[in-house]
Amino acid sequence: MVASSLKLQELIQEIREAKTQAQEREVIQKECAHIRASFRDGDPLHSHRQLAKLLYAHMLGYPAHFGQMECLKLIASPRFTDKRVGYLGAMLLLDERQDAHLLITNSIKNDLSQGIEAVQGLALCTLSAMGSAEMCRDLAPEVEKLLLQPSAYVRKKAVLTAVHMIRKVPELSDTFLPPCAQLLHERHHGVLLGTVTLITELCERSPAALKHFRKVVPQLVHTLRTLVMTGCSTEHSVSGVSDPFLQVQILRLLRILGRNHEESSETMNDLLAQVATNTDASRNAGSAVLFETVLTIMDIRSAAGLRVLAVNILGRFLLNSDRNIRYVALTSLLKLVQSDHSAVQRHRPTVVECLQEPDASLSRRALELSLALVNSSNVRTMTQELQGFLESCPPDLRADCASGILLAAERFAPTKRWHIDTILRVLTTAGTYVRDDAVANLIQLIGGAQELHAYSVRRLYSALAEDISQQPLVQVAAWCIGEYGDLLLEGTCEETEPLQVEEDMVLTLLERVLQSHMSLPATRGYALTALMKLSTRLHGDNNRICQVMSIYGSCQDVELQQRAVEYNALFRKYDHLRAAVLEKMPLVERGGPQVNEEAKESKEVAQLSEAAPVPTETQASKLLDLLDLLDGPSENAQHPPPLDPTPGDTLIHLLDLPCAPLPSAPIPNLKVYEREGLQLTLSFVRPPGTPTLLLITVTATNTSGGDVTHFICQVAVPKSFQLQLQAPSGDTVPAQGGLPMTQLLRILNPNKAPLRLKLRLTYDHFGQSVQEIFEVNNLPVETWQ
Amino acid sequence: LSKYYEHVEINKCRLLETEVIKSCLSRSNEQCSFIDYKDFKLIYQQYAAVFIVVGVNDTENEMAIYKFIHNFVEVLDDSFSRVSELDIMFNLDKVHIILDEMALSGCIMETNWARILVPLQILDKMLDS
């Protein structure tokens, strides 16, 4: 029994009324079952309706392959409505990979040789949409015949089907070459458009065809001229421009024909100038034509005046308020900047304005173009602009902008001092985005500019004193302070304001760099070596420096430990050699990646390498007696081996996580604990490269009158998290706002679950031992989302 | 409603469509209508609740395609008298016919309204009879 079939409209209505996805699926599945049944039973009257419904379901995404055979049947039927739906189905459901598609070939052949226009049109359409190579080969003769049919409707379709056939089977180009010349004389714009496209396709594929068609250049020129000169025929005009699509196609063909060919280019010169001046650019259609004209002028061997005209047109585009037009202008100017540099330079101010665009693709192109336009005369203003842009641009453009500025500075720097200034500014604004060799370059540059040593070291010192988070800046500054520390302390430098720097301040600053959790291991290495060098440069006693070295002699980082131990040895056993070893460095050769300090001993002195950051420090947590916190023994912190291992849980090594430099992620600090002057604050950082990682720095400050000693902080997190505690900076928080103690926590949150912490503190304060356990639930949302 | 003029695997079609739609929906009004996607360019335009997206390779003139989109919408307007997305949904096959009349095998074929709508009228007459 055949169920009553819905009309397509009703089906659509039903689907739209379905409130949920499941309901919709039900409706469709029911309907598909009907359709399948009716296909099996063969209901000729309504099968086109069934197929139409099936196609609708297919558009929504449901499988519809069982309709393929039905398509074939419908195509073969004599009724137009059936054929229509059948062909549509063939286009949507069949493709080259299916075996059934070859079966259509015969039907198409029959339809093509029938006299009915509409049917022929349908067949051609389907053929061009999904015709495979075999089909094209079989049906080529038919299509060729149709090219000469009296009906324009059929001819235009035939022409474009020929384009498709040539794409699939390039050998067919020979068949379709001869009719083209005749077709060019068409008056019907549709056919003309198609023919021009066909010729374009032919010329792109074979140079022989290209030569053949150069003959028709005059004719094309003539056609285009008539198009442009005659007033708009209302048939094809779009907002005042007569048939812009045809114009654009002809221009494109002219471009291909005129490329590298003097003669044709000459014929076109006048015409192009005419089109360029006559077309009204205030509307989109006009702009499209002008754009194509510009592209053509650029590609062929055109007169110089014409090229300047083209660049000016692009300049005008840039001033247009429509964003799209500015986009195309910037893209084409980018292509032109190599060949017509001076012409593009004139539009530099406008390009620089475009840097301020809110749209990312526009500002990116403006950036590239600006970088390409920098030359020795405008380098100062341009860098000024670009640095302004660097401060405000989105992060993905920053790296490009920074490296662009640095490159431009290298090539065109008017003075060394300006160069150093520029690099310094780039490092302070976008330090984390510069390439690794920027540090090396800057060091080498400063080293080479002897007269600027004092100046650079002062500038770097002040920059460092303000902000120690930008790693490349810190590295360079540390190196400079180490090398030229004496210049920093003595007297004034005439190029900067007088800066009174005490020895203590310098040492404090370097110690801060060493201790800060934001410093990479490589940076710490720099700072340590700089401290060492200062021991010879400064005139005070070296106790402080010795102290630092001995502390770091037991640091967990192997690199730092090695350096510290060696420096210690320099102090103790080889003191007489210290001065010689730590002399000023000779000038580094450009391109040398490794920079060696002079080694006079067989004893190996640490290498100052520009290597990438050393892998993370190994875990050095103290005794972590795992309490029954939150959801049982859930965290996966590591312990030193002899202590109680975590009951049962696997130790997941977080060593493989890179210690990424911390950019400023403005999550507000949270004060979690306060008692009798001892405060505990949490500050959060989410490194951008790893979305599941959260770094928390626990800072303990003491404003009371008594020291807090034996301070131990333990942390636990819910089950789905992974926690790693790093070594605290100490276990004493001195009184009266002394040096705060910091400890870094790394939390991995793969499930992005809400974060809660439970903290346990034990310490001695005012002679009493205090133990506190509390939970932190009010963490800001940004920490775990 | 989608039309491919180059061969794309059927399961890849879905994926491609979702990605393209995502990137178009995430653009705000201020950004320009051209997006770079993989190795082709997308040109899109939003008309109330309908998005029309055309993907072309590098050699096409973007502004011309932009005009073509506009032209297409005007033709739709003409045939459905103030087209809305409901019209498109209920008359899927008609929209396909119009598109087929305007562009064939990836090239623009006909841009004259009258000539495009003629076959449609013939079809309507046949359906009624």
Image (spheres, rainbow, N blue to C red):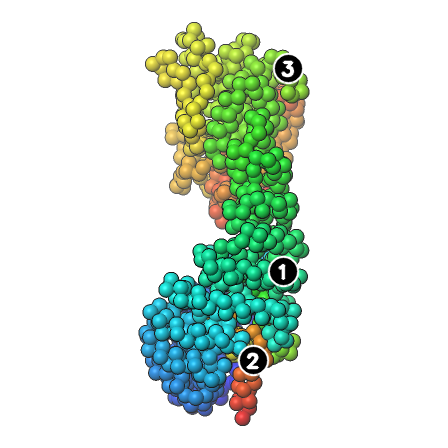
Q: Callout 1: few (<14), some (14-19), or many (20+) C-alpha neighbours within 10 Å?
A: few
Q: CA distance from mark 2 to mark 3?
A: 85 Å
Q: Report x, y in % for residue A502.
A: 61, 14
Q: CA distance from mark 3 to mark 1?
A: 64 Å
| Residue A553 placement: quadrant | top left
Labelled pair 1, 2 in contact (Cβ < 8 Å): no
Q: Residue at x 60, y 26 (%)?
A: A463
Q: CA distance from mark 1 to mark 2?
A: 31 Å
Q: Secondary structure at mark 1?
A: helix
**Residue farthest to the top?**
A576
A433 w.r.t. B4: above or below: above
Which is closer to the viewer, label 1 or label 2?
1
Q: Residue at x 51, y 50 (%)?
A: A335
Q: Residue at x 40, y 16 (%)?
A: A598
Q: Chain of mark 2?
A: B
**Disc number at residue B115?**
2
Please name the residue that numbered disc 3 is placed on: A492
**Disc number at residue A277?**
1
Which is closer to the viewer, label 3 or label 1?
1
Q: Report x, y in % for residue A574.
A: 41, 9
Q: Nearer the viewer, residue A167 or A587?
A: A167
Callouts 2 and 3 on one subunit: no
Which is closer to the viewer, label 2 or label 3?
2
Q: Report x, y in % for residue A325.
A: 61, 57
Quadrant for the N terminus of chain A, please: bottom left
For badge 2, the amino acid type reads Arg
Q: Is residue A69 visible?
A: no
For badge 1, the amino acid type reads Thr
Q: Residue at x 51, y 59 (%)?
A: A266
Callouts 1 and 2 on one subunit: no
A449 w.r.t. A23: above or below: above
For badge 3, the amino acid type reads Thr
